[in-house]
Every structure is written in C-alpha cells, then in structure tokens.
Amino acid sequence: MKNNYKYSTVISLSIIIVSLVLLNQNTIAQPGYYPGYRMLPNHSVIVPNQPQPQARQGYNPYIRRDNVQPLISFGMHFDPLLSWFSTDSYDVRNDGVVPGFNFGISYNRHFSPNYSFSTGINIINAGGRLISSETSQFELKNYNYDILTVEAGEQITYKITYLSIPLGIKLQTNQIVYGRFFTDFGFDPKIVIAGRADIPSLRIKGGNALPELNTFNLSFHAMAGMEYPLGGGSNFIFGIGFENNLFDTTRDNGDQLWDMVHQKALSFRLGITF
C-alpha cells in the first residue's frame, strides 16, 4: 500500500514538473508572432530635384545685365548738313542749297531710364542762296561799309556761322541686341559769330555780310537715330535731323524789300558718346 502511494506521489510530481516546463515555454514565446511572415526592411529613397527649364536668352557682351543707365553722358559729333532758305515773298526766293557742317559736344542728364535732358554747344556752318526779282542794295563790312547794287536775278550766296546751345529732351528705347533707338527734339538759341557772302556778278567772294544778318535767332530741332554699343560704355551714334530758324535770318536795311527769310537744315549725325 505504501509502495502504491509512493508511486502515485512520484507520478504526480512528474506531471507537475512537465506542466511547469510547458507553461514556462509558452510564457517566453511572443504573442501574435507568426513565424511564417517576414517583415521587409523599410529603406527611404531620396529623389534629387530636377532643374527647372529656363528660357533661352541671347548673349550680347555689350548689354549691361544690371540694366543700370548712367546718370550723365557726354558725346562729340560731326554732322554734315545741307541748308537752304525759305521766304514769304514772291520777290525774294530761294535759289538752292549750301553744304555745311555742325560740330559740337553734347551733354545728357537722365531723369529716368528712357528720358534725359539734352544740351551742349555747337558750331554750325550753314547758309543759303537768295535771288531777287528787283534790283536791291547789299551792305558789306570789310574795311569800311560798302553799299553795293545787285541787279535783279543775280544770286547772293550766304555762309553763316552760328554758336548754338541746344536745349532738348531725348527719348530712347531699352537696350536691345543692336543698341538703342532714340529721338531728340527741342529749341536752339543761337548767335551769329561770322557771316560771308558771295556775289558772282560783282566778283565778290567771302565778303563780310554781318550787316545783312540778324545777330540772334532761335530754331527748333528734331532728330532720330540709333546708338550702337562699342564696348567700355561708349556708343557710336548715327541719325538724321532737321532744323528750322523761327525768326528772320536776314535784315531789311534801307530800301531793301521787306521779307521773312527762314533758314532750314537737314543734317546727318555722326558721333560718339562716352
């Protein structure tokens, strides 16, 4: 009886030990773990930013990229020109053109990128030819005053030198590949500093004709052209201009016929700015 109790005790202890071992194994195992499923590693992928397409721009070494317009600029010019007279009288009329030139320096002060005040100083050599339908008197000042008689139909050629100070406004476009287009218009106060006359019928060439000319005058001018960049901030200028005296160019001395003579000029600008 003792032996049976002893065996039953041993069997009971064995069952308890086995149960504890199995219970311990279930406790170590991770709940919800599926050995047949394998998690893949999560790798981050960096995608480089693609460059944005930009509009293609033409290259011009003379265009300033900052679009900064100089506040002031200076220039020099030499303009070949053709000048002539117009009158309001049927008795005195124009008889042809006279070649000449306009030489000077210019000054521009910008008050906006496309507008500037323009001035300078010019020496203008211009003239014209007149012919009268009646006999007229002409006064020369050489060593003394000479009163000459010019027969009807005889030509008198004037060659006049002015000192002029133009006052105008200059408008110009933005910089493009080939330069800038511009226009300039304004008024030119001027003073006569020399006057000569040729009278072929009297064999007079280069006579002092200051007594026959008004000393002061005022003209208006209009010019259009283009500035072409040369590099280093310099520009070559070419254009075409027109000028017209507003007041009478000649005097009506003594018994001369009364007339209003306006001088006009067509010029071709050749110059440089810096």
Image (spheres, rainbow, N blue to C red):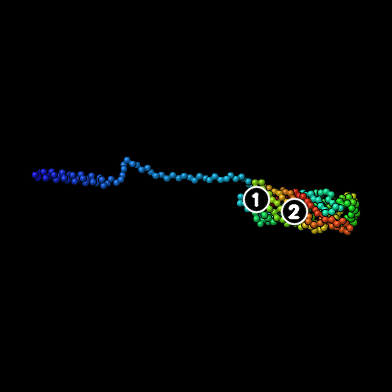
As drawn, which residue projects farthest toward the left?
A: 1
Sort mark 1 into few (<14), some (14-19) or many (20+) by Cα contacts within 10 Å. Answer: few
As drawn, which residue projects farthest toward the top?
A: 36
**Which label belongs to residue 174?**
1
The image position of residue 254, as x and y in percent, is: 88, 59
Query: On screen, 4 above or below 145?
Result: above
The image position of residue 180, as x and y in percent, is: 67, 49
- In this rendering, would 135 be left or right of 188? right
The image position of residue 230, as x and y in percent, is: 67, 47
- In this rendering, would 28 be left or right of 102? left
Q: Secondary structure at mark 1?
A: loop
| Number of callouts | 2
Q: Residue at (31%, 42%) from the top-left corner?
A: 35
Query: Would residue 94 be visible to someone looking at this image?
Result: yes
Q: Residue at (72%, 56%) from the top-left corner?
A: 168
The image position of residue 163, as x and y in percent, is: 78, 56
Q: Secondary structure at mark 2?
A: strand
**Which label belongs to residue 89?**
none
What amino acid does circle 2 point to? His
Sort mark 2 into few (<14), some (14-19) or many (20+) by Cα contacts within 10 Å. Answer: many
Q: Residue at (31%, 43%) from the top-left corner?
A: 34
Q: Which residue is mark 2?
A: 221
